[in-house]
Amino acid sequence: MNIYQQWQDAKAREAEATAERREIEDQLVAQFNVPLTLDKTANFEADGYKIKVEGRINRRINADLLQEIAAENDLGAHLSSLFRWKPEINAAAWKAADEAITKPLLDAITATPGRPSFTISTKD
């Protein structure tokens, strides 16, 4: 077998392992009633294991709408601190900002749940 076929076979095994791991993670989400909207870390213990689940919310920004809303609400000066100008949210600044600033900008943000990541280790 040549190296190219070996690589293709390894990629196929990797995809199968990823699919299996994700199925298990989905079972863990159900077992621990992890909400799809989890946007922080949750910790659990079961059967001698510590399970850490890091929830994520994926956010897409409509840059044109964001700038339009900011201009209408005289919030343009805040855009460079709340967003990386791709734009993407500067989460720490967004969470720390006053709601009077962030609330009008929400219509420009699409938030969808991301896959949680897991770390599983034995209890000490």
Image: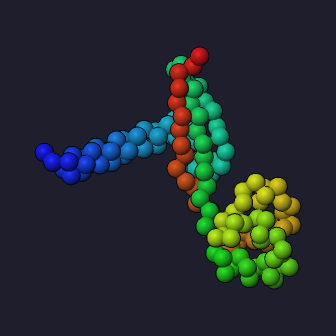
**Number of marks:** 0
* Position above or below: 64 against 42: below
* Position above or below: 12 against 67: above
**Closer-to-camera residue (36/42):** 42
- Residue at image location 59% in from the left, 16% down from the top: 124
42 relative to 15 in the view: left or right: right
Residue 112, position in %: x, y? 58, 60
* Position above or below: 76 against 49: below
109 relative to 31 in the view: left or right: right
Quadrant housing residue 78? bottom right
* Position above or below: 36 against 86: above
51 relative to 26 in the view: left or right: right
- Residue at image location 46% in from the left, 43% down from the top: 26
Residue 24, position in %: x, y? 42, 38
Quadrant housing residue 117? top right
Looking at the image, the residue that sits furthest to the front is 3
Looking at the image, the residue that sits furthest to the left is 1
Looking at the image, the residue that sits furthest to the top is 124
Question: Which quadrant of the figure contains the N terminus?
Answer: top left
- Residue at image location 62% in from the left, 62% down from the top: 59
- Residue at image location 81% in from the left, 77% down from the top: 76
- Can residue 43 be seen here? The reply is yes
**Closer-to-camera residue (64/1):** 1
